Amino acid sequence: MIWSAGLLDYFSDETLQIFLRRYYRALAPGGVLVIGNFGPANSSRAYMELVGEWHLRHRSKALLMERARSAGIAASKVCVDQEPEGVNLFLRVSA
């Protein structure tokens, strides 16, 4: 398993795509790549940005799926999960 949470929401979509391509190739047979990213349902976003000057790239399920496809990963290998509040999305890629 390769797990990344709290990192890639700081980077551009292009950097995310490069990461996906590189680490997907590094997965062992049966392995899983999981990438956590804040989603658009984050009701604290305005507070985070205005008060904390904490700027992240909030990505939707559709955008995470598109980045994976653009990295050359088949749609059948990809899904997006979320925790109950829907604030944190988890792009899951299977080898």
Image: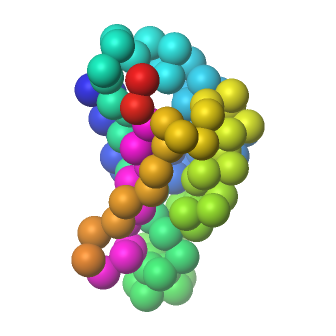
Residue 82's place in the image compared with 8, above or below, is below
> What's the residue at 31%, 23% (across, down)?
31
Q: Quadrant of the C terminus?
A: top left
Residue 85's place in the image compared with 74, above or below, is below
Image quarter of residue 51: bottom left
Q: Residue furthest front?
A: 76
| Residue 10 image position (x, y, % from top left) | 54, 50
Left/right of residue 37 with respect to residue 58 in the rendered view? left
> What's the residue at 26%, 77% (across, down)?
84
> What's the residue at 27%, 26% (across, down)?
1
Name the magenta segment's main secondary structure: strand
Image quarter of residue 71: top right
* First to last magenta residue range: 85-93
Q: Is residue 51 visible?
A: no
Image quarter of residue 80: bottom left
> What's the residue at 47%, 81% (across, down)?
41
